[in-house]
Image: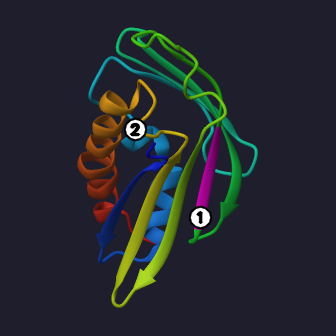
Amino acid sequence: MNKNNFTITLLTSKSSEDVFNAILDTRSWWSGYYSEEFTGNTKKLHDEFSFRAGDGAHYSKQKLTEVTPNKKVVWLITESNLSFMEKKDEWTGTQVIFDISQKGSQTELTFTHQGLTPEIECYDSCAPAWTQYLQNKLLPLISTTDK
């Protein structure tokens, strides 16, 4: 049985500080594809926020459990209701991890949704959705972010 968490790596010429700041501006990139509602704060340790999309088909509440400037951000998903899944709370207790590092002259962002594995029902729809948000929303935001 494959236990690989969903992971995607993005590269940018922007600084690690620019990447970090864009991640913390979650409202700007984790929105815009569906009818979404975003509430709460995403800037510092212990901030909490919720995200609702698809006319209520997806709801999750996150808490920032690690915030290391220019290096790492971790969200713990404390509540979830994925109405399109049989096990609606499949995300609850999983973690979303943003690791930032330097690779030569570029900054590498490694995104991991720990607990989102091919064995769970959500994987086939959630992995492509994360990819879409990260490549089409977060990466362009990083490109426009200045220190």
Colour scheme shown: rainbow
Kind of residue sitting beneath label 2:
Pro
Residue 98 at x, y percent in the picture: 52, 58
Region in magenta: 72-76
Number of the label disc, if any, that sits on residue 5: none
Residue 54 at x, y percent in the picture: 35, 15
Please tell me which residue lies in front, 110 or 66.
110
Check the picture and name the quadrant holding the N terminus: top left
Q: Residue at x 40, y 38 (%)?
A: 118
**37, above or below 107, in the image:** above
Extreme residue in the right direction:
46
Q: Residue at x 56, y 71 (%)?
A: 70
Q: Do the residues under discs 2 and 1 have CB atoms within 8 angstroms?
A: no
Identify the secondary structure beneath mark 2. loop
The residue pinned by badge 1 equals 72
Q: Distance between the Cα atoms at labels 2 and 1?
A: 25 Å
**3, above or below 139, in the image:** above
Identify the secondary structure beneath mark 1. strand
Residue 88 at x, y percent in the picture: 53, 14
Q: Residue at x 41, y 24 (%)?
A: 121
Q: Main secondary structure of the magenta part?
A: strand
Extreme residue in the front direction:
1
Kind of residue sitting beneath label 1:
Lys
Local crowd size for mark 1, using a 10 Å CA cut-off: few (<14), some (14–19), many (≥20): some
Question: Which of the 4 quarters of the picture holds residue 109?
Answer: bottom left
The residue pinned by badge 2 equals 118
